[in-house]
Amino acid sequence: MAEVALTAGDSEALTVEKADLAKCARCWRHLPDVNTETQLCGRCDTVLHE
């Protein structure tokens, strides 16, 4: 999930949009730095290869 918006007014509405970013296979966060080969974000890659 990339963004959630709750709009108050005469009627309430909730909008949920699919994330455009890749999801890290370890932490499941949608981030711009996910490596397509390892499917890991930079943070998880660092943790696993220390």
Image (tube, rainbow, N blue to C red):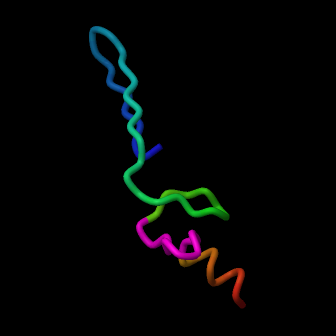
In the picture shown, does residue 39 fall above or below 45?
Answer: above
**The quadrant where residue 12 appears:** top left
* Residue at image location 45% in from the left, 72% down from the top: 33
* Residue at image location 36% in from the left, 19% down from the top: 13
Residue 4, image x, y percentages: 41, 36
**The quadrant where residue 8 appears:** top left
- Taking 33 as reference, is 50 left or right? right
* Residue at image location 58% in from the left, 75% down from the top: 38
Residue 9, image x, y percentages: 28, 15
In depth, the one of 24 and 16 nearer the eye is: 24
Q: Is residue 39 magenta?
A: yes
Majority secondary structure of the magenta segment?
loop
In the picture shown, does residue 31 fall above or below 3?
Answer: below
- Taking 44 as reference, is 22 left or right? left
Residue farthest toward the front in the current orientation of the protein: 37
Residue 39, image x, y percentages: 57, 69
- Taking 35 as reference, is 15 left or right? left
**The quadrant where residue 17 appears:** top left
Q: Is residue 5 magenta?
A: no
* Residue at image location 63% in from the left, 74% down from the top: 44
Residue farthest toward the bottom in the current orientation of the protein: 50
- The quadrant of the rendering that contains the C terminus is bottom right
Residue farthest toward the top in the current orientation of the protein: 10
Question: How many numbered dots are placed on residues in this image?
Answer: 0
Residue extent of the magenta highlight: 32-41
